[in-house]
Amino acid sequence: VPVISLTTDFGLQDGFVGVLKGVIWGICPAAHIADITHLVAPQNVMEGALTLWRAAPFFPAGSIHVAVVDPGVGTKRRPIAARLGSQLYVVPDNGLLTPLLEEAEKAGAPVEFVHLDKSQFWRPDVSHTFHGRDIFAPVAAHLANGVPLIEVGTPISNPVRLALSCPELIPGGWRAHVRMVDVFGNLATDLPAAQIPDLGAVSVRALGREIDGIVPSYGHRQPGALVALVDSENYVEVAVVNGSAAKVLGAKVGDVVEIIQK
Amino acid sequence: VPVISLTTDFGLQDGFVGVLKGVIWGICPAAHIADITHLVAPQNVMEGALTLWRAAPFFPAGSIHVAVVDPGVGTKRRPIAARLGSQLYVVPDNGLLTPLLEEAEKAGAPVEFVHLDKSQFWRPDVSHTFHGRDIFAPVAAHLANGVPLIEVGTPISNPVRLALSCPELIPGGWRAHVRMVDVFGNLATDLPAAQIPDLGAVSVRALGREIDGIVPSYGHRQPGALVALVDSENYVEVAVVNGSAAKVLGAKVGDVVEIIQK
Amino acid sequence: VPVISLTTDFGLQDGFVGVLKGVIWGICPAAHIADITHLVAPQNVMEGALTLWRAAPFFPAGSIHVAVVDPGVGTKRRPIAARLGSQLYVVPDNGLLTPLLEEAEKAGAPVEFVHLDKSQFWRPDVSHTFHGRDIFAPVAAHLANGVPLIEVGTPISNPVRLALSCPELIPGGWRAHVRMVDVFGNLATDLPAAQIPDLGAVSVRALGREIDGIVPSYGHRQPGALVALVDSENYVEVAVVNGSAAKVLGAKVGDVVEIIQK
């Protein structure tokens, strides 16, 4: 059964997401379709890119991921599709795939991009404002039907890339950054836990507060305690047990978190 | 594979939508089910009607659309089903289908209505407050199984109709109205772009602001600019590039937008 | 077609729910997956338990329900699975199944619990913070593939139970409690309507207001009227017609509602 995922900033109120599914099932009736999220902040390509990067690896090999956060819709920005590792992606060419692309490159995994310039795989009338419906969803459905990537577009090698935040080495440890704030108010940083030799013997500093050591999970401290731990993607995270670190610390994406080995 | 869509004001918090899916799969295990929206403003039949009208045409022929915005549940308002063009609908009889019905009539497409009065296609115990679960979902599932429309009810010809807003001809152009405000704050009007002979040579007036010309898409102006364009359903829309026209103008459904040919 | 439902406090923003679906389809590609809700208040096990209890009975026999509201993730709290009546459940052992368990016990329906201690049915690397992804979703998918309950864990008989609120007998009637507040602001109580001999001849008192009689449905009073009625699960409910009783009364979960036979 082909699997298609959807990641957008369309929200859940207006019916746009339902339209994507209707279009997909009109072309590939067998597809399973999973929503990753439709609550990316409007036009926030970075947030969409990071959300897709966290979710896509857990889908079966051969899944097709449609992501549409598309401030450039209707301009000359290209619609593209890609194979990264064992999965396929259909997106506007604005950097939405950067974290997945960098990871595939590091891993030496297959990387292919095509410019979607074959209109026979689109809806007949393409609007200027809703390429999710008119280009991305139909192309994904044709890929789900088994059309090869190379047939839906022309190979390219220069997809747009975002500049991703990186942790910096500082004396005694790392200066990391808050990369995502999740619904619980947990603060995911850009520092892989594997960079830290001894998780128990660190001091974590975030927004003027200091946390002693990295605990295995939320339940190892009392409700309300500020803790550092390893998140489910194996990065350092700052959290409040049964509470919101974002609220308690007033933290936001980009804020500095320092991890010092003791 | 039969496709069923759901449009309601049930919200996403209480599990009501999951219940509809459980009921449907108990009767028609093969059905694909797409959410159009469950965030219609509570009891706002007009908003539900317009959201369904914008989304349903993009579903495959033969799809079955369940819409439940139902302030009259438990009173004498009829449960109904309809064939409009190539698609089927299952709804309370309160006007939810008016825009789709008027369009089908204009197009000379098939139009059939039945009063759902055959309780063998309902859940055994029908509550007074949740006909979505007890009548509409089961009937939709039976239709998805191939039961003909004429078997689930008795033909009627007088469904309830809403009064839809219409653009009015004024000297030099049109007085249109904001019909929907989407999640981006874009203002969809009731004026089809096809009514305007020259899109580039118009002046658009909305809430005291004047916009020069209709641009092909958001990306043709700078972020923050107030623009008029043709929306993805081919109606005139007022928007702010990468922003919210609803917020910038303080606009709401029903507000006047004048389009004057220069 | 196997059916899996999902009930969590993950929210809809971060992609966690999409990840569960990706993991499930990687193991059981045929499964239909329904969201019950992902908007349980963070870590509110009672709210999750009641939402699941209201929705699960409407799913087909043999459905598999995954519920993850899991403040104890990463501690010694057990992951468990259960058969209650004709359905299967996969949850953390924190009381999420209490209302369903008590109902199954009252009905003399089958009740079986297992401790999920067979890691061959989990993802290879289990995180400390996301057992929904690493344990519950994979186990549910294996059950959907037909693996027997007894193979995924070791039988136990002492699942954690929550203390559920109960209505109390008082002179002339009942002292009930608000158990859930739904998206419309309707107040569901813990009093089954079947406990009231004559629904028309009661007086309902809630937060200083008195309501005369229990009406069949919302539409039997004018918009704005405060009413008592029988909800779709056959419990006494307090509502405002086309409005929010929660807002009008300032009511919340746990508040007292007295029902006095006249």
Image: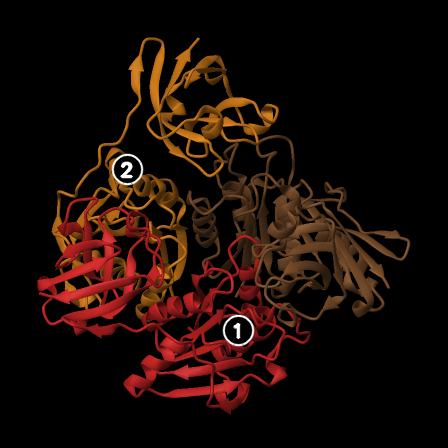
Chain colours: A red, B brown, C orange
Q: Are marks 1 and 2 in contact (CB under 8 Å)?
A: no
User: Which residue position is annotated with label 1?
Assistant: A28
Amino acid marked by disc 1: Cys
Nearer to me, A146 or C42: C42
Relative to B149, B130 lies left or right: left
**Percent coordinates x, y for residue C34 in the rendering:** 41, 55
Across and down, in percent, residue B251 comes to 66, 48
In this orientation, does residue C124 appear? no
Distance between mark 1 and mark 2 Cα atoms = 41 Å
Residue type highlighted by circle 2: Pro
Q: Specify whether B4 is left or right of A239.
A: right
Q: Is residue C184 left or right of residue C165?
A: right
Other-residue count near label 2 (Cα within 10 Å), few / some / many at <14 / 14–19 / ≥20: many
Between C213 and A207, the one lying in front of the other is A207
Task: Name the mark on residue C99.
Answer: 2
| SS type, badge 1 | loop
Chain label for disc 2: C
Counting from the top left corner in percent of width and height, residue A67 is at 47, 70
Q: Vertical placement of C178 versus A250: above or below?
A: above
SS category of the residue bearing label 2: helix
- State which quarter of the image contains the C terminus of chain C: top left
Residue under the point 43% across and 15% down: C208
